[in-house]
């Protein structure tokens, strides 16, 4: 069976008008197509093809994304800069790598299409790298730790907030605050104080349950752990999950204090649902955040098996115990697990900042491997792509040495609770960093730099839900694989203006990244980001963007694989090209 013979010479088909489901091809036909594609391409068309082999046949799935002419097969003419070509490939042949080559001007020249197949090798590779980052970044502490590791591998140097900085043109640096906020930057070789900043920001925190300072609860012969709700989580999704614990622990050794990053990694806590037989209203779910969100740790019977631990716990309640320890505030077995992870004893723990998380790891799924499901996508997608974009922009060091700006990626903590903390976007932390980098020149160099700068706020955005489409405004319905979303709100819940929107459009065009727009309905509430906060605090031009996702603030959210590559490429191009695009609008 052949494809071309079935169509009249002048036929042109739209993707809405046709769909090839599966064509069973023999080896001879597959070999013919392989040879044929090496000599010719489709004129005026883009065809995305996925081929998988079985014992007896090959399934050939074909998606037509633009008009397709079966009549005009002819030898390929030389390709222009913007021409998109996707070649046939089979599982017996190593897939053609759809790579992105950085041109001398910082734009991305593509050997693959502008919207690659969601299951394409490069899309998959970058999504898997993000999954690895996500599964390790179970708390803001761990997210910043993972960012540090990636930056160090890319040649960045750590700076201490409390120390003198010797920053040099062409240098790459980062500084952290509270170990949950990180600012990384690369100094252009032609930078002088008063020049601009190209900034992309995200945040490291997500809604979570956090262990209370006194967590010891016993009820109906169960030992439980008291938790506080952090942020606006969909708390009903935390029921019936395998929950683990991670965070930071402060321990003492004599009079010396030290911090330890810990992760239990296996499930130790559970919040069981109430059986439907006892529900007053079986069609709805209500949750009292104080009394219903109490994870079960153990049974009292099991807790009493270890007599030695019981004796230690009793001894710690005696007069004369060290006033710094917190053994009496928590179930000893719980504290013992935490202490073991911190390589200390329970009595050595002075304080701790612990988060609960779903022990079920994030993964790539879907029939086409096009979805990412997992916790903390809001906003570790933004954190990861922000940092990766900065790192990717530095692959050609010549571009940095020619740059007159400073490239900066900043990820703050506490966005989910208002950002009004020392490590949040409302603090003076980023302003102090910018001022230090502007020092040494004119006294007003910092103020001059603001007018030459642009900031991107990278935070996740709501895709249009197929089950609830009416939630979205009719003309603004972002979709998976549709590109990075620009957020617009006339009431300034987002900081995008016509100027900053135009700049990001130009950058996206040069990066070959599609953009979408979102505006909330007039009868709907609108969320916000750190974008308006930083725009007001710094007086800096700002644009709000994000990647599409579903189930935001659930313990298990959903996104598309394409977003990781698209956002990373957009931010990398922004760092390389912003200084050329913005001046005409200043």
Image: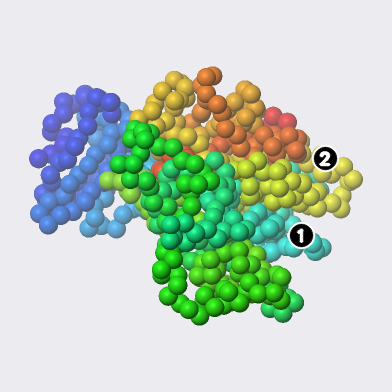
* Quadrant position of residue 312: bottom right
Residue 558: where, in percent of width, then height? 41, 43
Residues 410 and 208: in front is 208
Residues 260 and 455: in front is 260
Give me the residue at 45% from left, 72% from top.
Answer: 304
- SS assignment at label 2: helix
- Quarter of the image containing the C terminus? top right
Give me the residue at 37% from left, 46% from top.
Answer: 274
Q: Which residue is mark 2?
A: 447
Residues 322 and 91: in front is 322
Residue 377's place in the image compared with 350, above or below, is above
Q: Which mark is residue 101?
A: none
Which residue in the rendered view is the most extreme toward the right?
443
Residue 467 located left or right of residue 492 = left
The chosen color scheme is: rainbow
* Mark 1 vs mark 2: in front: 1
Residue 219: where, in percent of width, then height? 47, 56
* Quadrant position of residue 165: bottom right
State the CA–CA distance, disc 1 to disc 2: 22 Å
Q: Badge 2 local density, few (<14 within 10 Å), some, or many (20+)?
A: some
Residue 186 visible to the viewer: no
- Quarter of the image containing the N terminus? top left
Residue 174: where, in percent of width, then height? 68, 58
Residues 583 and 550: in front is 550
Residue 546 located left or right of residue 55 = right
Q: Which residue is mark 1?
A: 161
Q: Earlier in the sequence, mark 1 or mark 2?
A: 1
Q: Badge 1 local density, few (<14 within 10 Å), some, or many (20+)?
A: some
Residue 128's place in the image compared with 265, above or below, is above
Residue 13 located left or right of residue 504 = left
Give me the residue at 61% from left, 37% from top.
Answer: 529
């Amino acid at each position: 069976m052949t494809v071309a013979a079935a169509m009249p010479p002048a036929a042109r088909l739209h993707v809405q008008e046709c769909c090839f489901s599966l064509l069973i091809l023999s080896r001879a036909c597959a070999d013919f197509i392989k040879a044929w594609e090496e000599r010719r391409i489709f004129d005026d068309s883009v065809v995305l093809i996925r081929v998988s082999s079985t014992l007896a046949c090959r399934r050939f799935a074909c998606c037509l994304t633009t008009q397709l002419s079966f009549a005009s097969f002819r030898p390929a003419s030389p390709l222009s800069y913007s021409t998109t070509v996707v070649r046939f490939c089979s599982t017996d042949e190593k897939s053609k790598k759809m790579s992105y080559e950085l041109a001398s001007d910082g734009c991305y020249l593509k050997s693959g299409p502008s919207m690659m197949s969601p299951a394409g090798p490069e899309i998959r590779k970058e999504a898997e790298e993000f999954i690895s980052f996500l599964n390790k970044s179970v708390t803001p502490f761990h997210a910043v730790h993972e960012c540090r590791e990636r930056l160090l591998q890319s040649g960045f140097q750590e700076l201490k907030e409390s120390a003198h900085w010797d920053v040099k043109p062409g240098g790459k640096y980062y500084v952290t605050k509270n170990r949950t906020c990180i600012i990384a930057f690369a100094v252009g070789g032609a930078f002088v104080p008063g020049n601009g900043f190209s900034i992309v920001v995200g945040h490291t925190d997500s809604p979570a349950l956090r262990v209370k300072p006194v967590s010891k609860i016993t009820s109906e012969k169960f030992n439980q752990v008291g938790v506080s709700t952090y942020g606006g989580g969909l708390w009903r999704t935390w029921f019936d999950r395998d929950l683990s614990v991670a965070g930071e622990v402060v321990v003492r050794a004599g009079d010396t204090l030290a911090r330890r990053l810990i992760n239990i990694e296996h499930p130790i806590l559970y919040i069981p649902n109430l059986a439907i037989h006892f529900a007053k209203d079986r069609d709805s779910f209500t949750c009292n955040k104080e009394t219903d969100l109490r994870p079960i740790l153990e049974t009292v019977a099991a807790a009493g098996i270890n007599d030695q631990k019981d004796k230690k716990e009793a001894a710690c309640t005696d007069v004369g115990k060290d006033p710094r320890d917190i053994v009496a505030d928590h179930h000893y077995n719980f504290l013992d697990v935490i202490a073991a992870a911190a390589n200390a004893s329970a009595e050595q723990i002075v304080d701790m900042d612990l988060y609960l998380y779903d022990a079920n790891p994030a993964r790539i799924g879907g029939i086409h491997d096009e979805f990412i499901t997992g916790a903390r996508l809001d906003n570790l997608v933004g954190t990861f792509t922000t940092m990766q974009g900065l790192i990717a922009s530095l692959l050609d060091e010549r571009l940095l040495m020619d740059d007159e700006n400073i490239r900066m990626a900043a990820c703050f903590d506490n966005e989910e609770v208002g950002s009004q903390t020392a490590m949040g976007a409302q603090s003076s932390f980023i302003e102090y960093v910018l001022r230090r980098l502007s020092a040494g020149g004119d006294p007003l160099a910092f103020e001059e730099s603001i007018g030459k700068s642009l900031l991107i706020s990278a935070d996740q955005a709501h895709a249009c839900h197929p089950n609830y489409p009416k939630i979205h405004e009719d003309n603004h319905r972002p979709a998976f694989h549709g590109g990075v979303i620009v957020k617009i709100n006339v009431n300034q819940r987002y900081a995008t203006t016509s100027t900053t929107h135009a700049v990001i459009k130009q950058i996206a065009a040069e990066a070959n990244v599609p953009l979408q727009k979102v505006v909330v309905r007039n009868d709907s509430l609108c969320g916000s980001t750190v974008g308006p906060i930083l725009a007001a605090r710094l007086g800096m031009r700002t644009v709000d963007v994000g990647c599409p996702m579903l189930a935001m603030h659930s313990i298990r959210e959903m996104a598309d694989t394409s977003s990781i590559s698209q956002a990373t490429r957009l931010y990398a191009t922004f760092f390389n090209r912003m200084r050329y695009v913005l001046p005409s609008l200043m």
